[in-house]
Every structure is written in C-alpha cells, then in structure tokens.
Image (tube, helix red, strand yellow):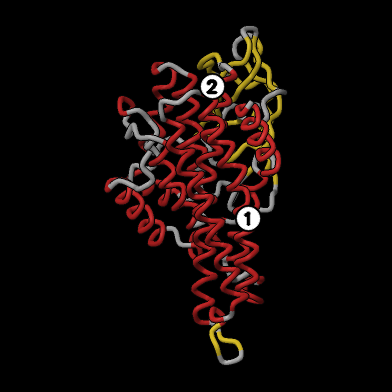
Amino acid sequence: MNLELSDEQVALRDTTRRFLADKAPISGHVRELLDNPTGMDDAVWRGLADLGTTGLLVPEEHGGAGMTMVEAGVVAEELGAALHPGPWLSTAVAAPRALTRLCDNDSAATILAGIADGTTVATVSFLDFQNVAAEDGNVLRGELGDVSDAAAADVLLVLAEDPDGTALFAVNTDSSGITVAPERGIDQTRKQFRVRLDGVPAQRLATAASADVAAVIDDLLIATAADALGAARAVMDLAVEYAKVRKQFGQVIGSFQAIQHLCVDMYETVELARSGVIHALWAADADLGSDEKHLAALRAKAFAGRLATVGDTAIQVLGGIGYTWEHDAHLYLKRLLSWSSLLGGPDRYLAEVGARLTRRGR
C-alpha cells in the first residue's frame, strides 16, 4: 500500500478544506447548529453534494464517483477538523456501504442515486436492532437506540428479524408510526436519537448476512476514526500555535521543556493513529481476507481511541482559555470523547487485537 495521497486525493482534500473554511466555519456554522436537532444547513449540505462528497462511495452507475474508503477518509478527516455536525458519515459512508454490501443494484438504485446527488439523507440503525421485528406485509415494530442523524434523515435503513432471518429494510422517516426522540450525549455536534417503530411500512431490500453487517460496522468505525483523526490534528494545531505566542515570565511558553513535551506527546499520538487509520481505510477495499480487514478496523479503533488524550493535553497547553465556552478546544475534546466511546471504549478492542495476534502466533 502507498501511504502518500495521490494528486486527485490531495485535490479532494484541499477543495473540501477550503469549502468548509469558507461556508461552514466553527464560529458561524457549527456553533449555530449545536442545538439544532438535524445538525445540518441545507445550503452547506447542497454544497458538499455539489463537490461530489456525498456520492464518493456510490457506484458510478447510480450517479456516484465509485471511489474507495481512502477517498471517504480524506473527506472525513477534513470534516472532523472542521467539527462538521451534519449527517455526512451516516449518508455518505454508512448508508452506501450497507446498500452496496448487502443489496443488489436494483433494490438499492433509487436510494443510492438520491445519496449521490444530495437529495436523499439516509442513516443506518445497525448498532441496536435486536428489538425490531418485521410482521406480515413488511411492517416493522420495535425500538432502536443510538441512531445517528435520524431527525435529518429522509430514509432509515433498519435491520429487522423476519421469517427468513435478519433482513435490511428501508423506512421513509415521514411515515406514520415513527417516533424520534433525541438522546443527549457529551458531543453536541453528534446527533443521536432513539427511534420507535409502531407498525411502520417498510421496503425489504435484502437478506442481511452477519458477515456483511459486521463489514459495514467496520467501515463505519474506520471512517469515524478518520473524522477523529482530523479533530485531533486540528486541536493539536490550535495548542501548538498558542504555545508559539503565549508568554509567561517574559518568554513564549513553547520555549519551556514541559510544554514541548506535551506538544510532542500530542504529535506522536496523532501520527501513530494516522498510520492505523490509513491502513484500515486501504484494507477496507483491498483484496484481503475478511479477518485481515476486520483486524485493521479493530486496530484503528483500539489505537485511535487514544486520540481523546490529545484533546486533554491541548487544554493543558492552552491553560485557562482552553476551559472557556468561547474557545473551540472543548468542542474538539467532546468530539474525541464521543469517538472513544463509540461501540465501546478502546480497551475492549485492544484486548481483541491482542487475542487475535496471540492465536495467529501459535
């Protein structure tokens, strides 16, 4: 694998970065949406779609770019650095990966085309589906927790049990019988919901094999790791720049060895995580066995989970200003904490990585 970005990927990164800086800055965009249940602005979403970012993972025959997780990771890192609060991970990563991994082209065509052109916002409820059942006529009943971006979504992709096993269903969120309630977490840029389905009509898309479901969850973990990498990089840069200009005892604090050590610790953590995230993004679409791909995702979660410490350390470097609501450091820390807790803390994944490597060495 090549760890260097291609010219096209660099162009994608730079274009996304400029767009977010111009159209979705933290002060004038992100903070205004902290209490907005959808977390999105239609004009900004339209702009992201026009850049082609919503259709990166949509096959070309459905109007998308047909690119790989590496390109999706490039965009995710920039969105994380900008603390973007919209439903991009749900719509541009989780939904198309679920549809392309689990469905045939015909059943998923309409949704994929809408995702690609930005007219459809979709989300996936893979993380909590044990209590949803499909009745005769593909009517769903049950309750789902930890559903990202449900208030913004037009389509909800649901795993439910029917007589043939586990299947993937598509639900229009304006259907009767759906109740969406916010679940408040530490990160206000991440919108989580509890969704109740009370006799909601749905379209059965495909049977959902457990291996394919696990692969989609791995894809979501990897893309979220890239988002967290961007957030950690950005808050580290804020702290380093502050250390270059803030003076104590007549000297910039960056000249003090204690501050230098903190900055080096942040840099080391970010760069170690970067290598794991890049490898996992590449592995997701590489010609590898399913075990190797899963191990790459586990590693990304196990080690990138330490990125939350970058937010802690940055606030130490920033001192008193880092604790204020007006400074962006706390928003980055909350973003990193939400990543660290996604699908369990890093310790669980470290233990699984260690167990797998131990078995392999026998």
Q: Measured along the vertical axis of the image, is residue 72 above or below residue 173?
A: below
Q: How many marks?
A: 2
- Residue occupying the point 30% across, 46% down: 6
Q: Which residue is mark 1?
A: 308
Separation of residues labelled 1 and 2 (CA atoms): 30 Å
- Residue occupying the point 69% across, 34% down: 145
Q: Residue furthest left?
A: 7
Position of residue 134 measured from the top left corner of the image (x, y, whole percent): 65, 15
In which quadrant is the N terminus drawn? top left
SS for dot 2:
helix
Disc number for residue 212: 2
Q: Residue furthest bottom?
A: 250
Position of residue 248 measured from the top left corner of the image (x, y, whole percent): 60, 87
The quarter of the picture where residue 361 lies is top right
In which quadrant is the C terminus drawn? top right
Q: Residue furthest front?
A: 362
What amino acid is at disc 2? Asp
Q: Measured along the vertical axis of the image, is residue 147 above or below residue 51?
A: above
Whether tag 1 and tag 2 are in contact, CB under 8 A, the answer is no
Q: Measured along the vertical axis of the image, is residue 115 above or below residue 163?
A: below
**Disc with the residue nearer the chain's start (1 vs 2):** 2
Position of residue 354 measured from the top left corner of the image (x, y, whole percent): 66, 36
The quarter of the picture where residue 126 lies is top right
- Residue occupying the point 44% across, 58% down: 24
Position of residue 103 measured from the top left corner of the image (x, y, whole percent): 46, 18
Of residues 100 and 195, the one nearer the viewer is: 100
Quick check: can you spot residue 149? no
SS for dot 1:
helix
What amino acid is at disc 1? Ala
Q: Residues within 10 Å of mark 1 (few under 14, many from 20)?
A: many
Of residues 65 and 339, the one nearer the viewer is: 339
